[in-house]
Amino acid sequence: MEIKITELDDNFARIKIRGEDHTFLNLLQHFLLEVEGVVMTKYDIPHPLIEEAELVIRTDNINPIEAIKKANEMIIKECDTLLKVLE
């Protein structure tokens, strides 16, 4: 995964992500919406043959990068829970 922040403000981020598809990005979008302070998030994959997506996030009272970190921590917890159930 290659990440490039193309726009960053106190409550807004636009990020290019290479090497990921709907599998991870849809999951990330779902958990971002669970993070308190995330107002809006979306991702776009403009063309299936181009391996680059764009993630956009708007927040209120939370840094957008911190929100992404929290969402990823939530994903890790869910995966750990699933692995424990499958044991």
Image (spheres, rainbow, N blue to C red):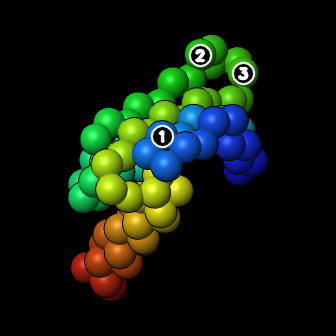
Q: Position of residue 54 (x, y in %)?
A: 58, 30
**Residue drawn at x 39%, y 39% as measured from the top left:** 58
Sequence-first tag of 1 and 3: 1
Figure check: 82 above or below 68: below
Q: Is residue 2 left or right of residue 56?
A: right
Depicted 74 relative to depicted 36: above or below: below
**Residue 64 in the image, given as x and y percentages of width and height:** 47, 52
Amino acid type shown at disc 2: Pro
Amino acid type for the residue under numbered disc 3: Ile
* Residue placed under numbered mark 3 in the picture: 50
Closer-to-camera residue (59/2) = 59
**Is residue 31 visible in the rendered structure shown here?**
no
The furthest residue to the top: 47
3D distance between C-alphas at marks 3 and 2: 8 Å
Q: Earlier in the sequence, mark 1 or mark 2?
A: 1
> What residue is pinned by disc 1?
12
Q: Residue at x 32, y 36 (%)?
A: 40
* Cβ atoms under marks 3 and 2 closer than 8 Å: yes
Front tag of 1 and 3? 1
Out of 40 and 60, give the one closest to the viewer: 60
Q: CA distance from mark 1 to mark 2?
A: 21 Å
Q: Which residue is mark 2?
A: 46
